[in-house]
Amino acid sequence: MDPETPSIDIPKKAVRALKVRLQVVKKHLEPLLSKPINDVFSKLPVDQRYELEVLLSYSLNSLYYIYLRTQGSDPQKHEVVNELLRVQKYIQKLKKAQGKEAKPTMRVDKDAAARFIKSAINEGASENQKATADKKRKLEETVSISSDEEDDKPAKKDAFSNYSKSEPSKKKKKNKNRNA
């Protein structure tokens, strides 16, 4: 098998594929080309007239682009590319006028998502800190309230009432000795 053989097969396949595609285009254009274009054009409503004009312009320019490629020239350097771009802009305008323009896709703005997450984390942390501070404050209030209640209770008079409050350690020692 000669190394040149595969390279020859590739263009033959491409030419066959091009012929098939051209036949499809011809089949679609046949209803338009079978009658005079003025007859077809005059019977269409205004919006379909615009569509037909854009379709024909794009089809002709695309076919010329393909022709340039088959002749071995670079169509990117030819004026046909600018014409194709101009017609594509008209296609977009028609779609926009008909409400068929491309809808924006759902995309995630990573920076905004990061800000939302960071904010939520900070709010959660601050809420936890607030909750902890509230619990601490309530605990301190209950402790201070209970200590205030003990101070407000009148002292019981017993055998040890002679001792002053400044000597609680002696009271405790005597109470321990007495219980023992």
Image: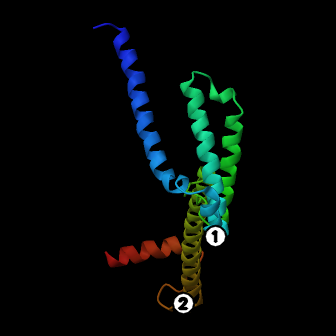
Which quarter of the figure is the C terminus placed in? bottom left
Dividing the picture into quarters, in which one does residue 69 lie?
Answer: top right
Kind of residue at disc 1: Pro
Q: Nearer the viewer, mark 2 or mark 1?
A: 1
Which quarter of the figure is the N terminus placed in? top left
Judged left or right of residue 22, residue 131 is right
Q: Nearer the viewer, residue 140 or 164?
A: 140
- What mark, if any, has residue 45 been given in the picture? 1
Q: Residue furthest top?
A: 2
Judged left or right of residue 35, residue 82 is right
Residue at 62% x, 24% y is: 74
- Expressed as whole percent of the image width and height from the top left, the position of residue 143 reads 55, 78
Q: Secondary structure at mark 1?
A: loop
Q: Is residue 117 above or below residue 13?
A: below
List the residue tagged with mark 2. Answer: 155
Q: Is residue 164 above or below residue 123?
A: below
- Expressed as whole percent of the image width and height from the top left, the position of residue 95 reads 63, 60
Q: Residues within 10 Å of mark 1 (few under 14, many from 20)?
A: few
- Expressed as whole percent of the image width and height from the top left, the position of residue 35 reads 55, 57
From where the camera sits, is residue 164 visible?
A: no
Instruction: Tell whether label 1 touches label 2 (CB within 8 Å).
Output: no
